Image (tube, rainbow, N blue to C red):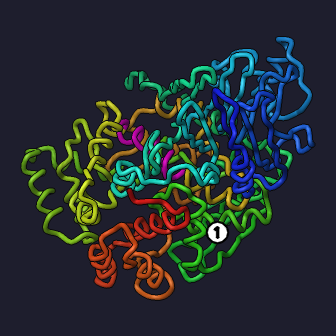
Amino acid sequence: MCGIVGAGGAAPLQNRSWLAVGRDLMTHRGPDDAGEWWSDDGRVGLAQRRLSIVDLSPAGHQPMHDASGMISIVFNGEIYNFRELRDELIARGHGFRTNSDTEVILEAYRAWGTECLGRLNGMFAFAIYDARKSELLLARDRAGEKPLFYYLKSGELRFASELKALLADHTVPRRIASEALDCYLAMGYVPGERCMLQGFNKLPPAHGLLFDLQTGHSKVWRYWQLPEFLVADHSLDEDALLDELEALIEDAVRRQMVADVPLGVLLSGGVDSSLITAMAVRSSSRIRTFTIGFPGHDKLDETKHAELIAQYFGTQHTVLMAEAATADLLPRLARQFDEPIVDSSMIPTFLVSQMVREHCTIALGGDGGDELFGGYSHYSQILGMRERLSGIPLSLRTSIANAAEKILPVGLKGRNWLQGLGYDLRKGLPLQSLCFDEITRRNLFSKDANWEPKAASIFKRLCPNQADLLQRATRMDFQNYLAEDILVKVDRASMLNSLEMRAPFLDYRLVEFAFGKVPSRLKANTNDKKILLKRLTARVLPADFDRQRKQGFSIPLNEWLKSGTFRELFNDVLLDPKSIFNSRVAASLLMGIDKGRKNGERLFALVMFELWRREYDISAS
């Protein structure tokens, strides 16, 4: 795993010093090695920080160049089918000087051009400079496991794994993009190609970007998309479907266990991590598993469930006890996350990564299982809502939703559910991760007369055009919540500790299987979730495994905010006159905590944004 940064322009680039500074601001992503290269004509600069995973020798140094010296690459990620691609390329006459997957990408590009993107099975963000064509190619993996930001202005393209690397140049503007901020406060993240800073962008998952250094023009395109569900339900062979699922998970885990450094499995004892453990022991008799305990928080304790799986499969199991989190951690996380997300589980994710890194360089996790196979509780909730409310006119439900938004205080139990009544589930979706509704956002922005609410219309445009409600919901979460929240959280928290996290469920073959072949009735209904995955657990896990258990990775934030260091920090940040948010609204949300209202995540959203804004000296306008 690595951090990459680079720039290219039609004319020789005069401002070069920021590149090495930006690279080294990402040392946490790659503490093992550093490289910088500039083209002879001074028009292209590439730099990288390396975390050595495959081919630990100096031959894996980046930037890497092909034998001709005309094609150069910086790469962040892992290609899990690089050995097969290497064999295929050798058969076509290509030679190799290293055993790295980086060189395989270089040769694949030489062989197939941009079509090579569809052949890569892995998590990646990379840039290739082709001096023959005077082009820069940027690309990002299908699910969005690895990040890539870019800034394009006046015929110059700059890119980096983390936004902080681009901000190493203090001459670039640092102004908030109001539309992105509105999305952040409504959805909990900034979706798609948008970025919290004006003029900056994210390359979306499953996309490539070609930049022509001669003209300064760029083209962004999607090279992969989710398949349509085409299987006739009446002809479905469920046993064959289960066989295929088992084979796909086993192969994905086997591929992702390839490494030249220590590797472990994060074992919570839930469905996803237990299945990964079961498949891992088929490839190796020496599997290390790790479970995290949180002293004083029995509801978060997963150790007994994990120990059942570890004992059954005979893994080398370690229980790690997390230290109590303190508010001092939040400024550090705000600095690391670049573009904030509304997810306080970044705190335990960071603590877990910190402890596991003392034992391993790589860890396998269960990310993606919920989106692919219907694991979230809100899937059952919206199916139940459609069932119970189908006879009530939408106009009446909308009136109730609007009244709840205007009358009931933010954070009151049941308010979000009532607001959800106003959505037309025949073609839309409720905004399940709703942080702040439009009225509250308007009040928060009362200082800004130019603020316009746009998040609802953006969310509507993002909603997949699927007649099947569950297909619509799971696809929406895969393309947005997973990519912009879950994977961002895991990447930033793990890489801050120089730990590489891998997600076997995000092998693109499993993704295509889940969305192209598994019918909704085998994912979730009003009473159950992950139906097909649970059937697989009956095959491969112990009989006394608890298949109905669902433990989210969370912290008791609302309790922490009633007093102590967290409350003190939140007060200091949100009641500061320099905050861009209305202090009266913030004070009301804090008082709501004292009355038992669930405002913790909303307050977390405001605090993390303000801490981030302070850290990077971001202007509100």
Question: Which one is nearer the viewer's eye here, 238 or 521?
Answer: 521
Q: Position of residue 362 (x, y in %)?
A: 75, 52
Please provide the residue range marked out in magenta.
471-487
State whether the magenta stretch is mostly helix, strand or loop: helix
* Residue 342 visible in the current orientation: yes
Residue 562 pos. (x, y %)? 40, 85
Identified at 28% across, 46% down, the residue is 454
Residue appearing at x 21%, y 57% in the figure: 419
Left/right placement of residue 357 relative to residue 267 reads right
Rendering quarter of residue 350: bottom right
Residue 268 screen position, x and y as percent? 61, 61
**Does residue 337 appear left or right of residue 473 in this picture?**
right
Above or below, 595 against 508 in this view is: below
Please tell me whether residue 460 is drawn above or below residue 339 in the rendered image.
above
Where's the C terminus, which quadrant?
bottom left
**Residue lying at 47% horizontally and 46% vertically, measured from the top left:** 195
Mark 1 lies on residue = 351
Q: Residues within 10 Å of mark 1 (few under 14, many from 20)?
A: many
